Amino acid sequence: MQGTLEAQERRVGASSGNQVLIPVGGVGLAMAGAATATLTGVEAMYWNPGAVAYSRKGELMFSSMSYLADIRINYVAATANLGDVGTLGFAIKSLNFGDILRTTDEDPDGLRGEQWSPNYITASLTYAKAFTDRVAVGITAKLISETILSSTATGLAIDAGVQYTTPFDLKVAVVLKNLGNQMRYAGPDLERQVARFPGDGPLNLLRTEIIASAGEIPSSFEIGAAYDFKFDPRNTVTLAGNFRNNNFSEDEYQIGAQYSFQDLLFLRGGMNFDLSKHGESVFTNSFTLGAGINYRLGGVSIMLDYAYRSAKFFSGNQVFAVRLGF
C-alpha cells in the first residue's frame, strides 16, 4: 500500500505548456486518439510524426475546435513530400481565449473596463522519411510560447515516432511526445517595488522580481496498433487501439474505429479510458464521434471532417477540419 501511494505522489506536480496536449484535426480526435498507427500525411503530424512520411506531394490542413469555456483552438499545417529526401512539415496551433476583463490591486472590480487576452502558440517543424513501404520514422521540434499580459514563458519540445506495417498488414506505432525543458514565467508583471525600511519614500524603493516556479512540459509515451478489414473493394473497417503513458496524469487507453465507403464517405467513433480510480480529467472515459467526406477534383483531394468529443462539466468539443492534397 505504501509503495502504491508513493508511486501516485511521484506523478503529481505542476506542469507547464499544457496546450501541447490539446488535439487537432478531425480524424484522430473522432477515433479518440487511437489513430497513431493508422493516420498518414499532414494530419499525422500531431499524432505520429513518423506517418507524415506518407504524405502526398503537397498537403494543407486547417482545423478549428470549440474547446472548453469558450476557448477556440485554431490550427494550420502543411507538408511537402520531397521524394528520396523525405517529407517536411510545418504547423501552428493557437488558442483564442476571447477578451477578459482586467482587474488589478488598484481596480479589483475592473471598473476601468480594460480587457486583455492570453496569447498561446505552438509552432512545429517536422521531418519524416519512409525507409520502405512498411517503415517510416519522423521527428517534430516544437516551440511553445505563452504570454499573459507582459509575462512570457517559452519552451522547446520534441516528438518522435515510428510507424511499421507488419507482413500480416497489422500497423504498429511507437510515439514519444513532448520531451522538453522546463517552462518558467518571467516579465514586468512579476516585478514589485518594496521599501527597504519602514517609511522609505518613492526614491528609496527596492525593485524586486517574483521568481515563478518552473514546470515540466507534460510528456507521454504511446504504443498503438490498427488493422484494416477490407470486406470488398468498396467497404473497409479500420479498428485501432492505443496505450498512452503520461508523466503528469494517469495512463490512458483509447479504442477507435472507422468505416470507409469507396474512400468517399467515412464514419468514425471511439472511447478514451482511464482504468484508475483517480482520473479527474474532464475527458476521462469520454466518447468520440465523427464523419468525413472526400471529394476529388482533378488531381486535388478535398477532405471535410467533423469530430465531437464528450466532456464532463463542460459542453463537448466540436472540430471542423479541411484537408487538401495535391
Image: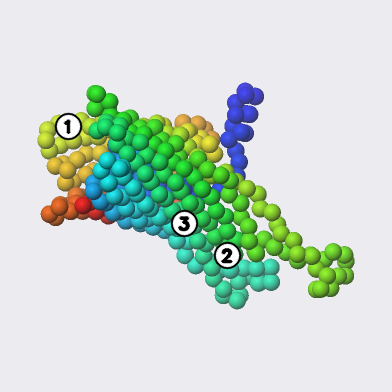
Amino acid type at mark 2: Leu
Which residue, given by chain and number where applicable, does mark 3 sit on?
Answer: 121
Q: Does the residue at mark 1 contact the one at mark 3 (Cβ under 8 Å)?
A: no
**Which is more foreground, mark 1 or mark 3?**
3
- Per the image, label 1 sits on a secondary structure element best described as strand
Marks 2 and 3, how far apart at CA: 14 Å
The answer to which of marks 1 and 2 sits earlier in the sequence is 2
Is 181 placed left or right of 264 in the picture? right
Marks 1 and 2, how far apart at CA: 54 Å
Point out which mark residue 313 bears. none
The answer to which of marks 1 and 3 sits earlier in the sequence is 3
At x 60% / y 76%, what residue is drawn?
112
- Per the image, label 3 sits on a secondary structure element best described as strand
- Kindly tell me whether residue 71 is visible in this rendering: no
- Kindly tell me whether residue 89 is visible in this rendering: yes
Which residue, given by chain and number where applicable, does mark 1 sit on?
Answer: 230
At x 56% / y 61%, what residue is drawn?
148
Point out which mark residue 149 bears. 2
